[in-house]
Image: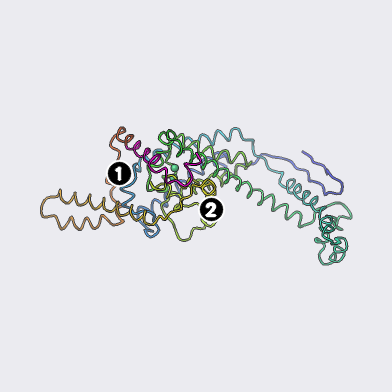
Amino acid sequence: MAAANTSYELPPLPEYTLRPQPPLLSWISDEALAAALPVVAYWAVSLVYHLIDVYDLFSKYRLHTPAEVLKRNHVTRYEVFRDVIIQQIIQTFAALALSWYDEVAHIGKADYDIAWYAQKLRLAQRAVPVVLSGVGVNSAALAAKVAASQPALAGVLRGGHYFHESVAPAFAGWELAVASALYWYAIPALQFTAGIIIIDTWEYMLHRAMHMNKWLYVTFHSRHHRLYVPYAYGALYNHPFEGFLLDTLGAGLAYLVTGMTVRQSWFFFSGSTIKTVLDHSGYEFPYDPLHWIFPNNAAYHDIHHQSWGIKTNFSQPFFVFWDRIGGTMYTGNVEEKYERARRIADQKVAQEEENKAKAMPNGSAVASAIELDENVRPQQISAPRSTRRKASSISQSPADNFKGLRNKVNESLHGKRANVLGVESSH
Ligand SMILES: [Zn+2]
Ligand SMILES: [Zn+2]
């Protein structure tokens, strides 16, 4: 394909030849990699947090105690794992389906595109003498003054006329450098920013709707809220339909609207996945570089998982401006509330141990007292899996489960509605 110089005096755009882009790795297509990477990233980051959790490596930075993990969640770890896998299967199929409709990626046009930006820069310089004369500056005289020491600046002051072009029109070095920076960095940064805003907007609107509409909440979203004490791989624990609608479609839409390349989508999809995992990790570390950029974090989203904060902090996963705009940001003090939940969970564990001790034969009172002391410590998390599952699941049967859920829903939809900041009035 050839492209000719389109404007008089403008340096010409180079010719280019498109050719299909070979995959980065020979054994997997770029599209398949785009579908696989978020899943790999999800489990890799989750595994790190799971080990931190199981070995209680950073107890100081936990949002909840191990006793709370045991006592407060209404779903077993197995059920969480299973449902996340189901969601990821759906997500992978959706990503592969999307790639069938994508055009085949080509390379070979970068120099042309950079020159195109450089041409636009050149055109923009034509305004410089006009603007300067508007404020009383003679740009031609100024250009003559600096021509010897600052030839590039002189060119700009002359409205984009460069003396080195006496033979043929050609771009100045700075024009190509700026155009190159625009092409390789500024435009992708804009695409990522727009993608992030699209995801945040999509998730906020639908997430809020899920909480405002009783049917939507009971049918879909209540499943995610069985986790009162979120952990990393619980991030995508959702009803499959909700997972598809909020996470998969939201990210897919952002990708399509912003016109990202498949290779950009590796970072975008994996990045947003990792962010969601971190926001459910249950840890708030003192140095969190991500938090400097994105105000949404684990502590922020954790409030939404608490019964007293469930009608607030809907924003996910990057920024919190939608909560600010929508009047749904939690503003109260949380310390006491967290402390109370910790105390109750500890009491439950202690009570359970006491009951166990009472059921023991006479003479083992001393041993059971020691055991009690051990069990209320954070190491509780590394208790055998059978104990954990038994303790963390309160659902006895599907019927009980539904009844409990319905009660909870009624409570959160009606009983606590008055506490929501401005939510009720706007709906
Ligand atoms: Zn929610
Ligand atoms: Zn969540």
Q: Amino acid at mark 2?
A: Phe
Q: Residues within 10 Å of mark 1 (few under 14, many from 20)?
A: some
In primary-sequence order, the first of circles 1 and 2 is 2
Side (left or right) of 271 relative to 384:
right
Q: Residue at x 62, y 35 (%)?
A: 102
Q: Give percent across and percent down for residue 343.
A: 30, 54
User: Tag 1, which secondary structure?
Assistant: helix
Q: Give percent across and percent down for residue 80.
A: 38, 41
Q: Give percent across and percent down for residue 153.
A: 80, 61
User: Tag 2, which secondary structure?
Assistant: loop
Magenta run includes residue 396 = no
- Residue 406 image-quadrant placement: top left
Mark 2 and ligand 2: say if the CB distance to the nearest ligand atom is below 8 Å. Answer: no
Question: Which of the numbered marks, if any, corresponds to residue 226?
Answer: none
Mark 1, residue position: 389
Q: Which residues are magenta?
A: 404-427
Q: Residues within 10 Å of mark 2 (few under 14, many from 20)?
A: some
Question: Which of the numbered marks, if any, corresponds to residue 294?
Answer: 2
Q: Nearer the viewer, residue 126 or 248?
A: 126
Q: Main secondary structure of the magenta part?
A: helix
Q: Residue at x 58, y 46 (%)?
A: 197
Q: Amino acid at mark 1?
A: Arg
Q: Is residue 401 above or below residue 263?
A: above
Side (left or right) of 367 relative to 156:
left
